[in-house]
Amino acid sequence: MLLLIIITLPILHFYFCPGNSLLPLQSTKSCHSKIVMGNSCASKSRDDDEDSYHHKVNFASGNVHLITTQERWEEKLAEAKRDSKIIVANFSASWCGPCRMLAPLFGELSEKYPTLMFLTVDVDDLPELSSSLDIRATPTFFFLKDGQQIDKLVGANKLELLKKIPAAADSAKES
């Protein structure tokens, strides 16, 4: 069962996920509408406070390509196939605390492993794509080779991500 502790302070609200530190919530409305499962978010709530807050995190830092259209997704799949690159696709959401927490690390990893192609897809921008790939929680990391899934990581498991990305880079070198 999920342990969810909400701490109300005069100005900010926080939630604690096991394995994570305290993460800020943007508004009282958010405190009551977020569903946090382990290290991932399962539903969303957007309000004006959240929209201004999520812009503080750059989901496309480093060598991460932000995918906002189905056409761009298809272009990147074709490019990766042509260049024999493995794609690491981060399906996230601007309102998701664990996603915001991992965004800087994802950007750093994109610079450290240039043999891989790093993509970020906001599930709210591309709901059809997210649905077709059966994204049920954010963040979800897909590892794709020639357009086919070779691995997957659901949730903000930093240690597992730090294992899977170097392994993908090593397998890309062997190809």
Image (spheres, grey):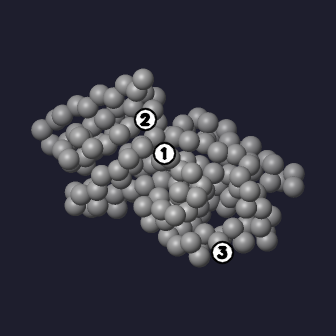
User: Distance from label 2 to label 3 (Cα)?
Assistant: 33 Å
Q: Distance between the residues labelled 1 and 2?
A: 8 Å
Q: Could you say which is closer to the camera, residue 15 or residue 150?
A: 150
- The residue positioned 20% from the left and 47% from the top of the image is 29
Q: Can residue 88 be seen in this view?
A: yes
Q: Mark 3 points at which residue?
A: 75
Residue type at mark 3: give it: Glu
Q: Which of 109 and 155 is in front in this view?
A: 155
Q: Residue at x 68, y 42 (%)?
A: 164
Q: What element carries label 2?
A: strand
On screen, residue 141 above or below 126: above
- Tell me if mark 3 has few (under 14), some (14-19) or many (20+) residues whose alpha carbon lies within 10 angstroms of its own: few
- Amino acid type shown at disc 2: Met
Give the labeled residue for mark 1: 137
**Marks 3,1: beta carbons within 8 A:** no
Residue 146, picture quadrant: bottom right
Q: In which quarter of the image is the N terminus?
A: top left
Marker count (numbered): 3
Taking the spot 24% from the left edge, 57% from the top edge, the residue there is: 47
State the image coordinates of residue 32 (x, y, percent, origin top left): 23, 40
Secondary structure beneath label 3: helix
Labelled pair 1, 2 in contact (Cβ < 8 Å): yes
Q: Name the residue under label 2.
A: 37
Lower sequence index among marks 2 and 3: 2
